[in-house]
Amino acid sequence: MTNKTALVTGASDGIGLEFCKILAGRGYNIILVARRKNKLNEIAKSLSEQHKNIVCTVLSNDLSKPQAAQKLFQSTIKNELKVDLLINNAGLLQNGFFTELDLSTQEKMITVNILALTSLTHLFANDMANRGGGHILNVASLAAWLPIPNQNVYAATKAYVLSFSQALHNEMRAAGNGVSVTALCPGYTATKMMNNPDQGAKLSVPAGMLQSAQDVAERGIKACLAGKPVVVPGFANRATAAITHLFPKMMLANTAGSYYRKNLQ
Ligand SMILES: NC(=O)c1ccc[n+]([C@@H]2O[C@H](COP(=O)([O-])OP(=O)(O)OC[C@H]3O[C@@H](n4cnc5c(N)ncnc54)[C@H](OP(=O)(O)O)[C@@H]3O)[C@@H](O)[C@H]2O)c1
């Protein structure tokens, strides 16, 4: 039993749910954050029944709303919860032709993927530093490593998450405050994000290219607790990330553009 507490955003589904299961198994108390309160309550109940030594707290929150991060931080204070591990996992995706996609939906994606993640990192990094340390895991994507036409805002938000996290990892280490920051860059992962009608067109990906959400979450937690700056789970994904360094960005954009236009349905 660790007697430590993890806060996971996007805890109601996909990779976020797997983070919760793994951390509960390691004895972490879990703060579950997402919009669907009923789903979070069901997960919290199931985790608490399976792991008698942990406490699960549901703080439902729509991270696309103004001041969402500040309100969430205040809720943790009100509930006397100290966060030792923050996982900024909640994320939105939009596939399609930029000018044809709804603008407000794209703005929401930027708010959740960038603004909420940055604000939560700021609030909890300060709190962790004041208490002698902690871990922050920011979920980026393999999409962070190249410009992706027809998924361009999403890829750009993930490039932000990767760059922000790498730079912050260095800052925290230089400050010697005990806070580690890790960026997790999954490739295609078998979650509802791969087939969600709310996210524009569907990208068809061969089953063999999909990683399991559990595998991705396990590798993320391992790297985060080891204080690594970046983790790209899976050999093929690591090879893809390495290849992006060898070619000009426009060449990568042209190749990705052809692939996405052919495979978006
Ligand atoms: N799946 C992939 O292929 C893949 C690849 C690379 C990176 N990623 C990244 O991995 C992370 C998790 O993705 P996933 O595949 O697990 O996605 P998912 O299955 O679609 O789950 C997304 C989670 O985010 C929550 N969420 C969405 N909007 C929210 C909001 N406004 N406020 C609070 N929570 C919100 C959802 O819960 P509610 O609906 O209950 O709010 C859900 O728990 C994302 O950052 C994604 O970009 C995924």
Image (cartoon, grey):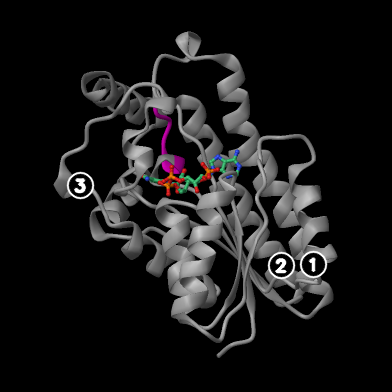
Q: Earlier in the sequence, mark 2 or mark 1?
A: 1
Q: Earlier in the sequence, mark 3 or mark 1?
A: 1
Between 217 and 34, the one nearer to me in the picture: 34
Query: Compared with residue 144, is residue 58 higher up or lower down, i.e. above or below?
Result: below
Residue picked out by circle 1: 79
Q: CA distance from mark 2 to mark 1?
A: 27 Å
Residue 198: quarter of image: top left
Secondary structure type for disc 2: helix
According to the picture, the residue beneath numbered tag 3 turns out to be 209
Question: Of discs 3 and 1, which sits in the foreground?
Answer: 1
On whether ligand 1 comes within 8 Å of the CB at mark 3, the answer is: no
| Dot 3 crowding, Cα within 10 Å, few <14, some 14–19, many 20+ | few
Give the residue type that dot 3 points to: Met
Give residue 75's quadrant in the image. Answer: bottom right
The residue singled out by tag 2 in the image is: 172
Dominant secondary structure of the magenta stretch? loop
Residue 17 numbered tag: none
Task: Assess disc 1: are there few (<14), some (14-19) or many (≥20) residues with their C-alpha within 10 Å of its C-alpha.
Answer: few
Please, is residue 105 above or below residue 225 in the view? Answer: above
Q: Position of residue 83 (x, y in %)?
A: 70, 70
Q: Are marks 3 and 2 in contact (CB under 8 Å)?
A: no
Residue range highlighted in magenta: 144-148
Q: Name the residue at the top extreme.
A: 100
